[in-house]
Image (cartoon, rainbow, N blue to C red):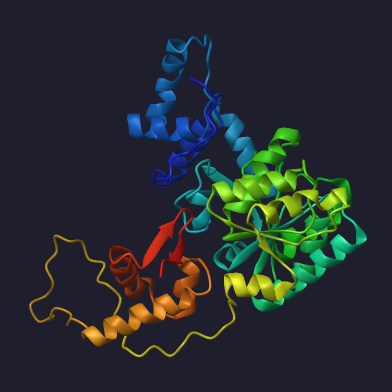
Amino acid sequence: MTQDDKSSTHPPLPPTTEDDRVAHFRLLRSRRVGPVTYRRLLAEHGSAQAALEALPQIAAAAGVSGYQVCPEGVVQAEFRAGRLAQARLVFAGEPDFPAPLADIDDAPVALWIKGRASLLKTPMVALIGARTASSLGTRMAAKLAAELGEAGFTVVSGLARGIDAAAHLKALPTGTIAVVAGGVDVLYPAENAELAKQIAKDGLCLSDQPMGFQPRARHFVARNRIVSGLVPAVVVVEAAAKSGSLGTARTALDQGRDVLVVPGHPFDARVAGCNMLIRDGATLVRGTQDILDHLGDPKTAAPELPFDLPPARDTAPAHQAAPAHQAAPAQRPLRQVAALHDAILERLLPGPLAEDQLIRAMGAPANAIAPALIDLELDGKVIRQSGGILARTI
């Protein structure tokens, strides 16, 4: 049994009772249990409690002697620390767990969140860059963050010095999410302590690390895959040839996210990584409008659709027959179906779009859009990329 670093894209159902929640969290916090092992144990044993009972024997078979599962007192202490910090624990599959994040290979099993969870349902974009940023770089980050916020985007970053801090600060009035490498109750770095408190009050802080956890270098790399996993696109303002920001950009590409980059002078080593990304095909950013042109403006009013949307689908179990007086829903005319397809394809220009963003832009319920998307996929007009991203093929 080894520590793993990749998770299934099909997370198990979240815990439903308080006892089950404790058992799930004990399993997650047990030594040598990462996301893959956690999900495999649940699949093999059917419940978190059964998996906990089996763990010592599994560890012994793997050559680990004297293995003990995480004691209940440890997770209860973490729950108390969470309540004291006014943070909440959300498991994958629960309503407040961000859907785009569940699709990445190494998705966290659970997150501690502190602040406005509703921001996770808004259009998001990540804005990252160098800790030792230039004055010009921080000004650019601040300008992009302020204007993206005014356009309707929530700005996601890592609460580091430099570019991250400038982006968070300017996006506070409109909404910002800080993904931290330690516990959500740990104020790091020290100079951003007041900013972190303000984000927890007016924005959102989140982490997959335990409460009270002091981060080490490797945890910032793990943090970065959440920053990019939350969003359809990552904007890089300044990045050296060997930097954490460049690593985040590459992780974003691996996750199927878009990477947009502000260029810099060829003689400036602080932006060598940015220029490398542009050379390799990243989208060049001259200002906020370039980002809006790429992602679409979330404040653009939904078009008046030339058809009537179907009513919400009946949620009764399949074995329950509809009442005799309830007529089967009529098929929509072909011209209305064609109009819906055309409207979706129009929304997918000029570039890829997250499915939930498309649904919001269409101003229609998901159960009206989903069948049309399936039709378009079967026709080869739309492809579905990782992270719930849709792209037009024609």
Q: Residue at x 89, y 63 (%)?
A: 136
- Looking at this rendering, what residue extends furthest in the left direction? 324
Residue 26 location in percent, x, y? 52, 32
Q: Is residue 371 above or below residue 218?
A: below
Residue 127 location in percent, x, y? 71, 60
Q: Note whether residue 159 is visible.
A: yes
Q: Residue at x 59, y 81 (%)?
A: 299
Relative placement, left or right, of 184 versus 189 is left
Relative placement, left or right, of 311 versus 107 is left
Q: Is residue 288 above or below residue 107?
A: below
Q: Is residue 13 above or below residue 153?
A: above
Q: Nearer the viewer, residue 319 or 269?
A: 269
Q: Residue at x 63, y 38 (%)?
A: 78
Q: Residue at x 85, y 61 (%)?
A: 137
Q: Nearer the viewer, residue 284 or 47?
A: 284
Residue 236 location in percent, x, y? 73, 57
Residue 142 location, quadrant? bottom right
Residue 235 location in percent, x, y? 69, 60
Q: Nearer the viewer, residue 304 or 316?
A: 304
Residue 209 location, quadrant? top right
Query: Could you tell me which quadrant the C terminus lies in?
Result: bottom left
Q: Nearer the viewer, residue 24 or 177?
A: 177
